[in-house]
Amino acid sequence: MAYKTREWRNAMRVTVDYNYMMEKSLGDKGVTDAELRAIKGKAEQAFEYVASNRGKDELFMGWTELPYNQDEIVADILATAKQIRKKFKNFVVLGIGGSALGPIMVFNALKHLHYNELPNKKRGGPRFYVEDNVDPVRMQALLDIIDPAETCFNVISKSGATSETMAQYLIIADALEKRGLSLPEHMIFTTDASRGNLIKIDEKYGGKFKKYVLPDGVGGRFSELCPVGLLPAAVLGIDIKGMLAGAAYMDGVCNKPNVSKNPALACAALQYITALQGKNINVLMPYSDNLKLMADWYCQLWAESLGKAVDYAGNTVNVGTTPVKSLGVTDQHSQVQLYIEGPYDKVITFISVGKYACESVIAHGCEDIPDVGFLGGHTMEELIQAENKATAYALMRAGRMNYTINLPEVNAFTLGQLMFLFELQTAYTGAMLNINTFNQPGVENGKKATFALLGKKGYEGQKKEMDSAPALEDKYVV
Ligand code: PA5
């Protein structure tokens, strides 16, 4: 069944305005129409690669089908979430990377900014925490404020072999057991269908854990729209059908091979062209506190997907621009000076919001002080939007490339669109670079080195190699 009316969906369409990337605005600092024409073929090939490999598990393209193939899973998740909301006071996600950034980002985007501090009645669901680190101080801080007996823990790990998540699991399992609490009653696993250690743990408990599947063809950073993100969101009372409908809508919008019609392809083409020109820094600057963590999610998606040493032809390429998170207007008072006057090595992507979730009128006062008095009678929405426009304009006047993604509102539908736009943009860019967008060999190497350092069986060789690295010298320690 279609989500809301066609008029509503069209009014909520997320768009990309790249005027301030182009020669017409930036003169010789801008991208030319001829440059866009020159990569037309490459962009079409990238579109074709994504379109023709949709849903292929072996290529990790399963994420393209998530907006369409989860009816049963969504029904199950909604039923489980209802029980959790009734039964538990806290819901804690244990996971890291792609298994954590999405749930936190969606929570921040669509719930009250001080959700956990709201009184129970106003909150309407359990308090929500995501533990995505192994800092002992943070774990202790969590244990200081939650009672495990009143908490549901969602352990999210595709592999079940990620040291951080499994260390958290062991600590929480121990805490539950010490209180005589049943693990399967307090834990839900989101993991691979049949492989991985969470499955082995579940088998030891006679298959009693509630489990959700992180599908084979969906990598961690592309997993927010599968149970990884849908269960936590549903527990928070977020409209998960709306998120999926938004993703499907953006998928439809992007179903064209031309840069001038497909916003994700336009963003990919611009990022590709400018990277070749040496613009190595890719800043994402939402003008919305609700979208602050969208920049964290995006940075992982972009960095892990596109930072690669070799291409499909086996050439050493060492590609990937560096994503940087920024927040408007806050970082106007921290980073924007550098963006406007520093090296010409950045492309800034703004996320602008048409209508904020609430309005706040600035009271009149201090009329005799011109620096202050002019603000009275305006709204904060007007102020933040004016500062957003002014910053984009100032950057353009200084010859700095920037473009804007416009969200009419921040809601489940527009957030779903935005996620899918970024996923497609990343996949297209990877295809243009002819790299494997969906692996992460660098991260895997770090994981292996950790195993070696902590004495995991089978990593003795790696440990030896690490021990034989050049000795560290005191003279370089100051
Ligand atoms: O995007 C990715 O694939 C990674 O960031 C993983 O999500 C992260 O390393 C956690 O892996 P796992 O889900 O296996 O615990």
Image (tube, rainbow, N blue to C red):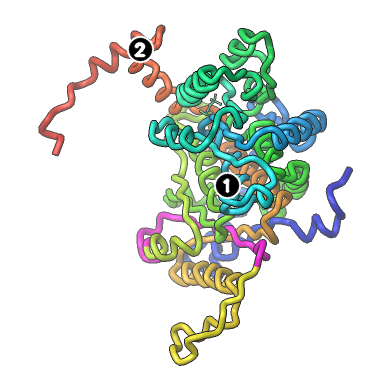
Could you say which is closer to the camera, residue 319 or residue 402?
Answer: 402
Query: Given this view, does label 1 or label 2 mark the residue nearer the observer?
Result: 1
Q: Earlier in the sequence, mark 1 or mark 2?
A: 1
Q: Residue at x 64, y 32 (%)?
A: 228
Give the distance between the C-alpha atoms of the residues marked 1 and 2, in whole angstroms: 39 Å
Q: Which residues are magenta?
A: 338-358
Q: Is residue 293 above or below residue 380?
A: above
Q: Residue at x 48, y 32 (%)?
A: 143
Q: Residue furthest bottom?
A: 368
Q: Residue at x 65, y 63 (%)?
A: 356
Q: Residue at x 38, y 35 (%)?
A: 137
Can I make out residue 111 in this image? Answer: yes
Q: Residue furthest left?
A: 475
Query: Of helix, strand and loop, which one carries label 2?
Result: loop
Can I make out residue 256 in this image? Answer: no
User: Residue 363 has which mark?
Assistant: none
Q: Is residue 233 above or below residue 9?
A: above
Looking at the image, residue 22 sits to the left or right of residue 278; the answer is: right
Name the spot of residue 318 as percent of width and height, x first. 42, 35
The residue that disc 2 covers is: 455
Looking at the image, residue 307 sits to the left or right of residue 218; the answer is: left
Q: Is residue 121 magenta?
A: no
Name the spot of residue 439 as percent of width and height, x first. 54, 27
Q: Residues within 10 Å of mark 2 (few under 14, many from 20)?
A: few
Query: Of helix, strand and loop, which one carries label 1?
Result: helix
Could you say which is closer to the camera, residue 307 or residue 276?
Answer: 307
Q: Residues within 10 Å of mark 1 (few under 14, many from 20)?
A: some
The N terminus lies in quadrant = top right
The residue that disc 1 covers is: 116
Q: Amino acid at mark 1?
A: Asn
The reply to whether discs 1 and 2 touch (Cβ–Cβ < 8 Å) is: no
